[in-house]
Amino acid sequence: MCRSLMPFLCLLTMLLTGCPSAPPAGEAESGEIPALTMVRSADLFSDGVDFLALSEDGSTYIVGNKDEGVGLYRASDHVLLERYYERKDEPSATPGDTGLRGAKAIVFDLGYIDANTWHFTEKTLGENDIRLHIRTIHPSRQISVLSMKEPPTSAIVSNKNYIAYNSGLIDWRAGKYYPGDSDFFPNPQCYSIPTLTSNNMIITFLGENIVIFDPLNGRTGYLELWEKVIRFGKRVVVTPDNRYVIGLSTTSRKCTLWNWFTKKEIGHCSERLREISGKHIEYREVLTLSRDGKLFAVGVDDNVRVYRIEPFRLELEVATPGPVARLALSDDGWLAAYDYKGFLRVWNVATGSLAGQHSLFDGKTIHGTYVPEIAFQPGSGKLFTTAYGAITVFEIPKQSAQQEAESDSGTQKE
């Protein structure tokens, strides 16, 4: 009798709560989990990979280390195309100086503007100015070098027309800088990842306060919507079309999806704020958005949920061996998660199946001080990861035609 009541009770619960449903959490983990297929692994830096970026067409990638320089690579065969400020292993002239031994410059950041244009920021040792280099790949040339007096106090991000530098915008084609309001200048001790929207507004934060910079129109201040939002980790996420915002609610302390234009909550994507009531309160929640802005994933403790934005619904919920540390989503329906026990796992979002895993450590204890970068290469079926000074590439199993159709349409498995 109890069994016969279960479907009715589950349906009644869904109707009363209005919560989105999800397909099963995937394969049972009692059986052997397949290993991810490694297709390349190479040591690039001695002190670790600090930066990794892949071009939007997947043809090239950039890696960097803060004091060992920057390298541009061709993705098809991993040939080094360009290298800048490569460190020489020479004894330091300063007694006891081990941090920058042999370094030529300090690298602050790097990234792509489009598939053929990329940038990196550095300060050559012994000089005062911070230089923002903007280069094209085909042909290989430097199209602009901009000198900035102030060091970056946040990550440097870009769209097709501008680069966000601190609270201002750089027109990289014309070499012109549009400063933001210095009264709202972010705290240099609170490094953040700002959002640069497609309509050239910078979203960053001061403490728990979200600030909107509009340098082109000379406007800076708070918007009503943002008074309800706390940054998620180090950023507030806005979809590429500026229609949706993902952040933590100041009232419920939950991960929340808002409509940008109506300023209304669409739904919640986590039950709690980990640092207040989770099992691992020493770690923050983790959030990632697919490049096309259709899916996002949120990790809390040892749980990951993948949501579709239109229509808003839970697509997948899975467990990880340790607290979630890093997430990545591909546009063709794959989820990658790295946890603090050192496991890297990949799931098929459409089917919920666990495609494979790779472990950096023994998997028995929590390693809470190291988090590698992970990123799917667009259109390739490959996952790029960093591990200390190396970059490793894994092959993702190919999806069937039915799975690809389900991923594109948002069809759920019943």
Image (spheres, rainbow, N blue to C red):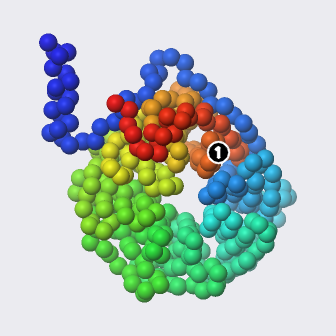
109 to 183, vertically: above or below:
above
Q: Secondary structure at mark 1?
A: loop
Q: Residue furthest top?
A: 1
Residue, x 51% and y 55% (percent of image)?
291
Quarter of the image holding residue 59?
bottom right
Residue 102: percent from left, percent from top: 80, 60
Q: Tell whether 222 sits left or right of 194.
A: left
Please say whether residue 157 is visible from this viewpoint. yes
Give coordinates of residue 88: x percent, y percent. Answer: 84, 59
Closer to the camera, 387 or 189?
387
User: Where 370 sits versus 34, above or below?
Assistant: below
* Quarter containing the C terminus: top left
x 55%, y 18%: residue: 32
Kind of residue at disc 1: Ser
Reply above or below: 218 against 316. below
Relative to residue 342, is residue 63 drawn left or right?
Answer: right
Which residue sits at x=41%, y=44%? 410
Q: Nearer the viewer, residue 44 or 247?
A: 247
- Specify whether 44 is left or right of 193: right
Q: Badge 1: how crowded within 10 Å, few (<14), some, or many (20+)?
A: some
Q: How many marks?
A: 1
- Residue 71 x %, y %: 75, 58
Query: What residue did someone put label 1 on?
Result: 380
Residue shown at 30% from the left, 68% from the top: 261
Position of residue 279 measured from the top left corner of the image (x, y, whole percent): 35, 37
Q: Which of the pair 15/187 is nearer the observer?
A: 15
Which quadrant of the structure image shows residue 281? top left
Res. 254 in view: no
> Which quarter of the rendered picture does the N terminus lie within?
top left
Residue 400 horizontal side relative to residue 27, left or right: right
